[in-house]
Image (spheres, grey):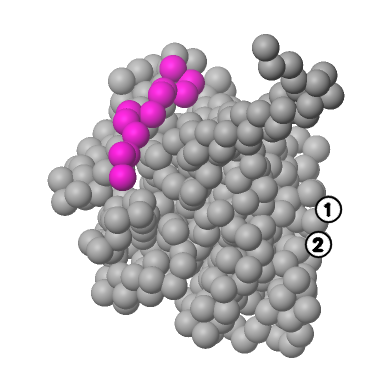
């Protein structure tokens, strides 16, 4: 009989043990591509233009001459807070008194504070109103946001800050996001040195997209202020710019400025066989005093991302429609952002009636018809029917198998 010395037996067993461990590790790495590690998923919510018209400030003024905008968000904050990252376009300056609305906006800091407390984590500041109070207004806005602990992107005190902080890199749940932000202009008000406003410029955008990849971004999102006000369909220039951004490395393009909900697309590049590419041309107003047809509401966009061993991709994209009720709730007059589907079915829960209820249904019907037509054309972006106090977060309708 052949006997193996004990020390050799130990060596052989260790050798086979190492082989087994390596094989197990290889199997785990392989399977992780298809079954991602827990926590490597990310839910992002985007909202449109956060406005501050003069009647909004009057409604938020309290007895002690301070301002309280918290009621504006009371019916949607559960939805906003369901996100891992929530982003909104701040389309006012926080330049101090006198507080004014159109055409040159300056809002109390409490507006940004209420949005933060409602769940918004990041604010985009590059838009056509960011220079409404000149250099002082731009820089004070940034100081207020910094004081409130709200990350921001799109406008900067100087070029050094811009190069240091843009793209904005955000890490959540093991996913590394790069956020970029640009505007078409500043209503003809010149940007004063050394301030920087990110304009839509292909040379700058190409550089920023390269930097995003160099910084290890798993997913790149471009926030962009563009288009024609009150047009319910994107124009050719928007379409060309979106295609350029997608071709140069942006995974999603999320737009604003027209103050109405515009169309959206999915898989804008028919040659793409990697994962869906998202273009949302305009989400409309988040809250404002605009009451014309299509201006009195908007949509929030929800992206669900999943990171695997190979890539990070969109597994679901949905929109949540809302309407801005300018009226009284429990004897308090305010501008209330209310989920339109829930409000249409249960108007008594929001104390909406009469002409206001008619306006709510008009907005809901117009928006759903417009966006359903996008779905018919292949944009697999479905409606999220958010019901306050009933189904706070409905599950994803389906996953895209690409």
Q: Secondary structure at mark 2?
A: helix
Answer whether residue 175 is magenta in the image.
no
Q: Which mark is residue 147?
A: 1
| Residue at 63%, 33% in the rendered image | 19
Image quadrant assignment for residue 25: top right
* Magenta stretch: includes residue 395: yes
Q: Choose top left, top right, bottom left or bottom right for residue 116.
A: top right
- The answer to whether the residues at label 2 and label 1 have Cβ atoms under 8 Å apart is yes
Quadrant of the frame with the C terminus:
top left
In the image, is residue 135 above or below residue 32?
A: below
Position of 111 with respect to 236 (left or right) is right
Query: Please, what is the dominant secondary structure of the magenta stretch?
Result: loop
Most distant residue in the front direction: 1
Q: Quadrant of residue 180?
A: bottom right
Q: Which residue is mark 2?
A: 143
Percent x, y of residue 213: 58, 66
Q: Which mark is residue 87?
A: none
In the picture, the quarter occupied by the N terminus is top right
Q: Secondary structure at mark 1?
A: helix
Residue name at image x 60 percent, y 66 percent? 212
The residue at the point 66 percent across, 58 percent down is 169
Nearer-the-camera pick, 314 or 14: 14
Residue 37 located left or right of residue 240: right
Q: Position of residue 63 (x, y in %)?
A: 75, 35
Along the viewing direction, whichever of 229 and 325 lies nearer the viewer:
229
Residue interval drawn in magenta: 391-402
Comparing 139 with 110, the one in front is 139
């Amino acid at each position: 009989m052949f006997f193996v010395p004990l020390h050799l037996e130990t060596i052989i067993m260790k050798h086979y043990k190492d082989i087994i461990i390596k094989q197990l590790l290889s199997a785990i790495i392989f399977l992780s591509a298809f079954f991602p590690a827990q926590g490597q998923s990310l839910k992002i919510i985007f909202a449109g233009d956060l406005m501050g018209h003069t009647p909004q400030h009057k409604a938020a003024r309290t007895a002690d001459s301070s301002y309280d905008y918290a009621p504006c968000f009371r019916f949607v904050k559960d939805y906003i807070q369901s996100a891992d990252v929530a982003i909104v376009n701040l389309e006012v300056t926080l330049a101090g008194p006198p507080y004014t609305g159109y055409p040159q906006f300056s809002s109390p800091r409490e507006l940004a504070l209420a949005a933060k407390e409602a769940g918004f984590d990041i604010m985009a500041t590059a838009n056509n109103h960011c220079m409404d109070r000149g250099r002082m207004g731009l820089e004070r806005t940034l100081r207020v946001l910094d004081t409130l602990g709200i990350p921001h992107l799109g406008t900067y005190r100087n070029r050094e800050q811009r190069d240091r902080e843009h793209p904005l890199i955000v890490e959540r749940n093991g996913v590394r996001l790069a956020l970029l932000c640009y505007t078409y202009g500043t209503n003809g008000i010149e940007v004063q040195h050394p301030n920087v406003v990110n304009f839509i410029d292909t040379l700058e955008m190409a550089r920023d997209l390269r930097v995003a990849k160099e910084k290890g971004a798993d997913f790149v999102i471009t926030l962009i202020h563009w288009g024609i006000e009150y047009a319910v369909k994107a124009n050719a220039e928007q379409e060309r710019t979106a295609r350029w951004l997608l071709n140069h490395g942006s995974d999603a393009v999320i737009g604003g400025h027209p103050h109405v909900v515009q169309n959206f697309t999915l898989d804008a590049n028919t040659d793409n066989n990697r994962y869906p590419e998202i273009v949302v041309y305009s989400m409309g107003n988040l809250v404002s005093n605009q009451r014309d047809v299509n201006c009195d509401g908007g949509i929030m966009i929800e992206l669900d991302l999943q990171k695997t061993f190979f890539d990070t991709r969109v597994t679901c994209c949905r929109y949540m429609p809302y309407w801005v009720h300018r009226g009284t709730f429990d004897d308090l007059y305010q501008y209330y952002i209310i989920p339109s589907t829930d409000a249409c079915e249960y108007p008594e829960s929001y104390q909406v009636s009469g002409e206001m209820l008619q306006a709510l249904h008009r907005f809901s019907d117009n928006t759903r018809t417009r966006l359903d037509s996008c779905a018919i054309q292949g944009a697999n972006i479905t409606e999220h029917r958010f019901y306050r106090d009933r189904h706070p977060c409905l599950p994803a309708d389906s996953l895209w198998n690409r």
